[in-house]
């Protein structure tokens, strides 16, 4: 990887153009044309180019508006194309397929402060180019002056902690399960149990938004008094992320319902509401935005297609998301642990003056995961959500929450799980129940 | 493919549940667990399930809310996983990987009329499941009663033809090129040339929305008088799709600018504005929505991951898109022609009472493509956009447009290109210029 493209930095001086402000994108590119040529094709397609020289495309226009190839780092070529290209097949290509890490610079003037068009530029038609047999957007970088044109997280980690009243430790949370089908009253009863267990954070499942059998407003109005009741007892109110995903007006309406009822967080399905909706919500919202990334697998799971999470989370942070899901260690999902940790680190790393997003660990989590998670990240600035690991604890929900806290306290103190569990029955029973199963 | 899942039909009676209204999704599934088991895992994950039986998940709740496996059609297994799963690796899986076409039925009550949550259900976390080593959403099907809860295209093909005054032939169009960098005045001058050539349709490039060097309002105000001037002469006004992609308020504002100036179409980057934005725009807009699918390659290009276009276009039609891009035959993109044709057919096929979207053919197109395109589709209900093929015609833009019309007239009349070109110099010179190049 190029050292010029250090994650977490704003654009370093030596990379900047002397003549025009630019933003940057880094790609893995596979192509049947040599990598330098492929980089030029992509740069052309994504800026001033077409398949032939047109009368309007003067040298001066190119100089001002054409994307610039900053670097091409060759990787080992492959003998078979990773992805099919009928375009290559029509040309009867038979040789090798070049692979490289390519960095492009795009003039900011091409786009302006417009997130959908920023995406169309760094992640548009280029995925479909006939020259390309593999393409992944690895990362983006923008100068702080450009990032400042986008809203960014309003609450980020600090604002979230303030609202939740949780400091110096991770926010321990859970997801309302079963995902769908609970009545409003059943939901409120479960929330009551969760709050009685001193939980920090609860969220709706992404499958549950505003269904006819448990309408959003009724759900909020049933759940919020429960949260407020426990707030009096706890001296802090557990944060509940209500899933407001839907149409624009519906999201605003539902946001207002949450605010009026005294709630402290709203949740959205990022990919399926979309960039314009999230930016709009950020500008409107009085609450942190809990970003659920469902559908993300389709965008990332092939190693030579789509998006790396480093790029993805930056784009959503520009739009203003405060929390982003990153899967969990040893989860029920496909993702290797090193990828999960890299995602969390990316969320926590400042870039271009944009505040961090709080990483949300979820899926197959329980107390026993804490030491490893802390070992990797050396921070408690995260949400650690356990479904079964809290609700399914053999001694009940309160013991589930307690076991998570005990594990985190041990992790931060450098005490082994074994030693901590000798002292703490909740942790001991969590290990007995989940240690082999999960 | 299951006959129960015929494209273009509303849900047939024999597929419907007797007890609950449902919508349907069909997938290609690859898994290290047998396909029937994988189908059950996906159905659980995407409805009432979690990784363990929870107290609230009663038999009655499952009966009402759990997704149902309708069918599992086994395909040949493979010996290597298509996509990596750390979950499988942790279990030390060494055997084969099952592949199947799986159909699931989801209770409509789980979702209600909520597009982002419909997506979270049919295309959410399931892509990331550890059991899954390949997953593609092939198609969806919804009963007409459910589809009626979504807006659907407001103009569709007929409304677009009315506004453009183009009947009984394809709409011949082009894209403003170079994509970026033209001043407002240069754009207006090019539009003037295009209209002088009797073009039917012009669109902005997806890379151009509202940049500082050619602000949207100024661009509309420079272009619209040109269109109106030619409308007087032509008796119809060429349709111009102004790219309003941006934030929600910006899109509404820019839509209003187009309406006030007398324009007849707005364009959006579907994937990067998003589902909520498009539905919102559909409910607000007085104009057809021209849907650009840039970024689509990331979602579809791997044969065992992401989305098939059949599902994709139905979702955007539910949201209310009137025109959808489908690439072109023998284009500069990766896509094989049969895939392009299947996409166009999908757009044109009614489903569940939802109006068709007008398919937009673009990329590397020119007159010579018309006979083959018509041969496949036997319709002229489409847009045929040529960039270089119109603007780069050796005898100028008017000859470029004329050559496209001549080719289409010949195609519809069953006259060969060779015969038609003997009669038409514009077509003859197009073949001479582009026949070998493109």
Image (tube, coloured by chain):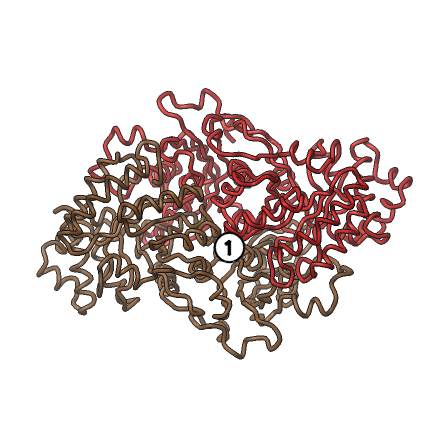
Chain colours: A red, B brown
Residue B297 visible, this orientation: no
Q: Front-most of A358 and B80?
A: A358
Q: Which residue is mark 1?
A: B306
Q: Front-most of A91 and B243?
A: B243
Residue B70 image offset from top left, x and y in percent? 59, 72
On the picture, is B156 further left or further right than A257?
Answer: left
Q: Is residue B401 above or below residue B218?
A: below
Image point (29%, 31%), residue name: A62
Q: Chain of mark 1?
A: B
On the picture, is A428 further left or further right than B284?
Answer: right
The kind of secondary structure element at disc 1 is strand
Q: Front-most of A138 and A192?
A: A192
Q: Front-most of B15 and B392?
A: B15
Residue B69 image offset from top left, x and y in percent? 61, 69
Q: Is residue B85 above or below residue A312?
A: below
Residue lying farthest to the front in this orientation: A260
Residue B169 image offset from top left, x and y in percent? 22, 63
């Amino acid at each position: 990887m190029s050292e010029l493209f250090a994650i977490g930095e704003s654009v370093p001086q030596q990379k900047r153009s002397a003549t025009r402000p630019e933003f940057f994108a880094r790609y893995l590119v596979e192509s049947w044309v040599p990598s330098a040529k492929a980089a030029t094709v992509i740069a052309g397609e994504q800026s001033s180019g077409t398949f032939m020289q047109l009368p309007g495309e003067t040298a001066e226009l190119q100089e001002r508006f054409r994307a610039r190839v900053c670097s091409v780092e060759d990787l080992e070529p492959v003998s078979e194309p990773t992805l099919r290209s009928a375009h290559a097949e029509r040309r009867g290509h038979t040789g090798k397929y070049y692979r490289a890490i390519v960095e492009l610079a795009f003039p900011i003037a091409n786009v302006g402060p417009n997130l959908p068009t920023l995406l169309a530029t760094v992640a548009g038609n280029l995925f479909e180019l006939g020259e390309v047999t593999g393409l992944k957007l690895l990362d983006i970088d923008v100068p702080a002056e450009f990032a400042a044109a986008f809203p960014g997280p309003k609450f980020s980690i600090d604002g979230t902690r303030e609202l939740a009243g949780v400091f110096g430790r991770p926010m321990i949370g859970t997801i309302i399960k079963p995902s769908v089908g609970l009545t409003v009253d059943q939901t409120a009863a479960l929330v009551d149990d969760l709050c009685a267990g001193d939980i920090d954070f609860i969220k709706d499942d992404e499958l549950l938004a505003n269904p006819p059998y448990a309408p959003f407003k009724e759900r909020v109005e049933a759940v919020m008094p429960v949260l407020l009741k426990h707030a009096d007892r706890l001296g802090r109110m557990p944060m509940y992320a209500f899933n407001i995903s839907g149409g624009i007006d519906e999201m605003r309406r539902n946001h207002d319902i949450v605010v009026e009822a005294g709630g402290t967080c709203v949740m959205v399905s990022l990919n399926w509401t979309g960039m314009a909706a999230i930016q709009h919500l950020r500008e409107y919202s009085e609450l942190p935005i809990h970003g659920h990334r469902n559908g993300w697998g389709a965008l990332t799971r092939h190693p030579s297609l789509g998006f790396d999470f480093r790029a993805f989370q930056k784009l959503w942070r520009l739009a203003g998301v405060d929390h982003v899901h990153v899967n969990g260690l040893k989860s029920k999902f496909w993702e290797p642990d090193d990828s999960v940790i890299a995602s969390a680190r990316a969320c926590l790393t400042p870039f271009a003056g944009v505040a961090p997003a709080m990483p949300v660990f979820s899926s197959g989590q329980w107390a026993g995961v804490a030491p490893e998670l802390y070992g990797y990240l050396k921070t408690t600035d995260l949400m650690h959500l356990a479904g079964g690991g809290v609700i399914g604890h053999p001694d009940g929900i309160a013991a589930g929450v307690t076991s998570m806290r005990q594990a985190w306290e041990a992790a931060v103190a450098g005490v082994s799980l074994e030693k901590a569990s000798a002292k703490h029955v909740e942790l001991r029973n969590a290990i007995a129940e989940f240690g082999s199963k999960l």
